[in-house]
Amino acid sequence: MKLYITLLAMALSVAAFAGNKDEQAIRTMLMKQVTEWNKGNIEGYMKGYWEDDSLLFIGKSGPTYGYTPTLNRYKKSYPDAEKMGKLTSTIVSLSKLSDKYYFVVGKWHLERTVGNLEGSYTLLLKKIDDVWVIVADHSS
């Protein structure tokens, strides 16, 4: 019986560590996005997104499908550092859906000389080739 309890405790510890490792990787990726945005580097910011035609971004103008159209949408909406401003992002919740998917709810704020913007976002992240990427983003 002691062996069973010990093995169960070890299995739970390994599972918790794996979850924490994934959550830390996701938080690190999202922090890198903020850092790249604040450098004025939209291409660097986009490294957090799935580079695929199936990427889904939903903003105030409706859905955009694909990595390149999403990148172009960002470049059009934020053509220079003044329009980009300084981004602050706060994770409200980070929920594991499965070993391959996480759901993130957060808030964003842009501090800009041309007028501040803020809103909320939901992200669906998928682990692809051992890397967490955003496969769907709904920002408003």
Image: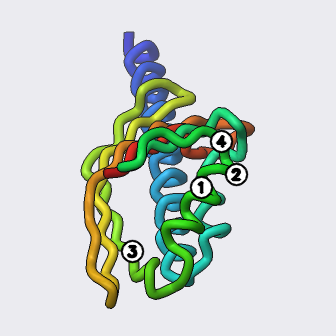
Q: Name the image quarter holding residue 56.
A: top right
Residues at circles 4 and 3 in contact by the CB criterion of under 8 Å: no
Q: Nearer the viewer, residue 90 or 64?
A: 64
Which badge, 2 or 1, is on the more N-terminal residue?
1
Query: Which mark identifies residue 48?
Result: 1
User: Mark 2 belongs to which amino acid?
Assistant: Thr
Secondary structure of the residue carrying numbered label 1: helix
Q: Is residue 79 left or right of residue 52?
A: left
Query: Which mark identifies residue 87?
Result: 3
How far apart marks 2 and 1 lie (CA) works out to 13 Å
Q: Residue furthest top?
A: 1
Secondary structure of the residue carrying numbered label 4: loop
How far apart marks 2 and 4 lie (CA) works out to 6 Å
Residues at circles 2 and 3 in contact by the CB criterion of under 8 Å: no
Which badge, 3 or 1, is on the more N-terminal residue?
1
Label 3 neighbour load within 10 Å: few <14, some 14-19, many 20+: some
Residue 118 drawn above or below residue 96: below
Q: Name the image quarter holding residue 48.
A: bottom right
User: Mark 4 belongs to which amino acid?
Assistant: Gly
User: Mark 1 belongs to which amino acid?
Assistant: Gly
Q: Name the image quarter holding residue 58.
A: top left
Query: Which mark identifies residue 68?
Result: 2
Mark nearest the camera among 4 and 3 is 4
User: Mark 3 belongs to which amino acid?
Assistant: Leu
Where the N terminus falls, by quadrant?
top left
Which badge, 1 or 4, is on the more N-terminal residue?
1
